[in-house]
Amino acid sequence: MKNFRRLLLAASGLAIAALAVAPTLAQDDGLIIIEGNFGGDPATFNPILASDTASRRITGFLFPGFINANAETANFSEFDPPLASGGIVDSWTIDESGTVYTFTLREGLTWSDGDPIDSADVIYTWNALQAGVEGIVDTPLSFVIDPTGATGILDVTAPDASTVVVTFASPECTSLGNVGVLYPAPSHVLPEDLALLNDAEFNLAPTVSGGAFTFSALNPGEQVALLANDDYFDAATPGDVAPAGFIYRVVPDQTVLFEQFLAGETNVIDSPAVSRLAELRALAEAGEKQLFTFPGNAWDYFALNFADPTNPQNGLDADGNLIDQGAHPIFGDIAVRQAIALGTDVDAAIDAAVFGEGERMNSFIIPASWAYNQDLPLIEYNPDAAAALLDEAGWVDADGDGIREKDGVPLSFTLYTNEGNGRRTQTGTLIQDQLSQIGVQVNFSTIDFNTLLDIIDSQTFDSVILGWRNGWPDDPDATQLFTAQSDVVGSGSNFTSWSNAEFNELNTQAKTLAGCDTAERAQLYYQMAEIFQNELPYVPLFAINGAYAAGADIAGFGPYPSLLYWNVDSWSQATP
Amino acid sequence: MIKYTLRRLLQAIPTFLGITVFSYLLMTAAPGGPVGALTQAPNISPQQRQRIALQLGVNDPWIVQYLRWLAGDDWMRWDTDGDGKADQSIFIPVGFDANNDGDYDDATEGDLHFPPGDNKGILRGDFGRSFFYNRPVASLIGERVAATLELGLSSLLFGLVIGVPIGIIAAVRKGGWFDNVTRIIAVCFSAIPIFWLGLILILIFGSQLGLLPMGGRCPPTLTGGCPPIWGRLEYMILPTFVLATGAIAVYSRYMRASMLDVKSQDYMRTAQSKGLSGREVWFKHGARNALIPLATFLGPAITGLLSGAVITETIFSWPGLGRFAVGGVTSQDYPVVMAVVIIGAISTICGYVLSDILYAVIDPRIRFD
């Protein structure tokens, strides 16, 4: 018994000693930014190989981009500090065919080891992308190369150290977006033999940097630590990156992530749970935290299958001709689609599913986009009009069971969303309830995400609620989502099988407009949005508001939409 | 005993192979697949998706995929002319035949030759590469196993150190207040969901009192690395306690029952009649014999050490194998899932063999034939 008491005593002593060691973080040399992120563990720090959000976050700190984009206009731009900086391109010209872009690189840029950043570093990346197509390098960036040569980038050359010439297969306004994948990589420290790139030591311990920070350490599954790179060429104060460093902490639980931020264990949070935004707003008003919200680029949709789900087929045959895929027994009727849109109270869904932190959409174009038509009215919730539309189309409840039918076909369909997503589950439940009030039976169920992907890829579904996240800068090109060429059973993103000749024509015009003037392109997208709203392959739902928050002790925190860290080199410890 | 152990391990080989076949079949039969998770972006074309699926080999029949995982693919696809591209293959395609015309050489159609296979297969010690991390699975597991063992061992020890004495005292004071109180606590510990307990403790000791960190294994530092355990005890207290609650409940109740069984044995009466003190009778003679059945618990417990504690690791941001395994399953990262299955299978087999050995160590009367 005495031994047991001793043991207990020792255990208690150990616990008390541990409690005395309060979690601290030395901040003697300036601000240390600590971001808690539930996005997961970065897979690599090589910009050529990075595909996941966590890896992209870190490589964004370590390496420069290729082309600059203006933080304010959210459009590609020539080098124009401070809002359009961080990329190595100074300016560019386009030849008469619209397919050859000649980029002039900025002079005097160097990696952290003093080696110049030049066109050879871009060519290295291009070679890696080509090797990626052949499966030699596991890069996600090879999507810009079409092995047939029909689309995308055909070739990249470097006539001299400060010039990069990119040749595209066709003149497209999405070219600048594609060219963004040519991240300069420090070719002087990377393996010459690209077959060795996948396993290069550099991928997890980069020795050279060209961004605001240099790599310090990785604790797998837990954190990544970066140190200030005072040689960063785009620092607001030349020769000085203000924060001492950056720590990325992996925090897989949303509740814990938020509590850590409130307690000051972390001082930056990207995309806090919308359910806690009201709390954050109150803290921001009290001056205890800083908060920035904006119309986000992630959006949810309610997709309706146009084709016969019992006989899924591709949109085009081998010769490129449209295939008659048959019509969906319910959604084949445009009146049903329009009635469903009128009978769906999206505002109620925004309130219930995202606590009001969402912005309604009037088409497939997100409200944050330059192509969003503010003048195109939203589809207002009007169950009476929806019911009238269905009556007129012959969908009536003849047997009094509460469900309309026409020619013996009940107005009943399945609606799926992915299990575990509270927002979409809430939206689906509301839609089910709202449509039942106009005599439409919705068999709503949540299923495993991978199972759902299988179902939509096989095009055997009736309807789904899912979402997309657009890139930044966003281009509203609809080729992969709503054209017949991407209606491929098993692998195409146009799984609703919607195809509209006028829409396709406008999309092609907007994509290939000479000069790519944004205002002119926007007019074309406005027309596409109208067609989309009439045809309704998706009932437009909402874009979820984005949010960034920081501790009150951080000076310089001033994000733009989708750009949390654009000026991170000037963040500092606020003086009380 | 060595002969016995070797025999048991050899007998386990068919079991092990059966587990891998069954697991692979189940995994590939599950809906969805890694390609969907890897290519969820609106700018990926159907052809790119098809190419990625072929490169990963997930379109092959499951038996071919299993064979590749088991015996590698360096003999399935190879290069004969030394240009670095495969030109011969069995079971799997040489490359990407864009329009399915049986020709892999027409680049204008988008045809491609893949590189030769380089996976050696699990039989030659190659766990393969993770689809998501794009790194050898063995190194990914190596980076996480220490964290899992650390948490698992500490909670096992904590569970034993607290649970066993509680069980002994409860048996000695059967029907007393200590017995009743510990019984109620044991029931509560068994019934409380771990995720709830973890969050509540984080809110109390981390958020409200600010006494303990709310997660992680090591303090955040710009230099990285992790101090020795005694330099970061505060990070271990909550996850260890949460993970040990179930063990404390089980060990204490089991030990109590075992002690009560032992109490009626002849040698206990002999010890008492010899005039030994109560403490000596209970702890020296009673507890040691009562520990024997507990050894059967240790085998599975050791298995649990390696398979990780998924919920605890997630709540406390602990960078261990459990969380890693769940990520692998969610994204259908086949090589990761299979590696975790292998670890689970091997540790289970070894755990039970260890149980048998512990029996002999604790009770010298037990011998192996």
Image (cartoon, coloured by chain):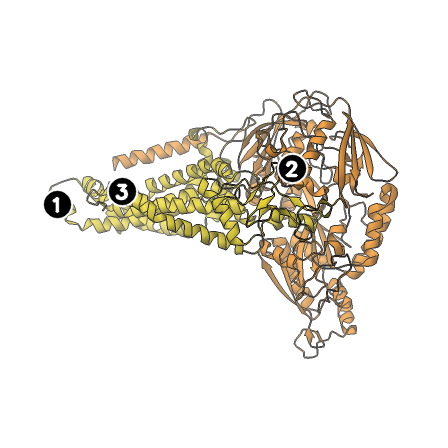
Chain colours: A orange, B yellow
**Residue A576 shows in the view:** no
Quadrant location, the N terminus of chain A: top left
- Whole-percent x and y of residue B34? 58, 49
Mark 2 highlights which residue? A56
**Is disc 1 placed on a helix, strand or loop?**
helix
The residue type indicated by label 1 comes to: Thr
**Residue A237 shows in the view:** yes
Residue B363 or A100: which is nearer the viewer? A100
Number of dots carrying numbers: 3
Mark 1 highlights which residue? B270
Residue B55 or B39: which is nearer the viewer? B55
Both marks 1 and 3 on one chain:
yes
The chain holding disc 3 is B
Q: Residue B154 vs residue A243: left or right?
A: left
Mark 1 or mark 2, whichever is nearer to me = 2
Mark 3 highlights which residue? B3
Residue B357 or B183: which is nearer the viewer? B357
Mark 3 or mark 2, whichever is nearer to me = 3
The residues tagged by marks 1 and 3 sit, at their Cα atoms, a distance apart of 37 Å
The residue type indicated by label 2 comes to: Arg
Quarter assignment of residue B6 = top left
The chain holding disc 2 is A
The chain holding disc 1 is B
Both marks 1 and 2 on one chain:
no
**Is disc 2 placed on a helix, strand or loop?**
helix
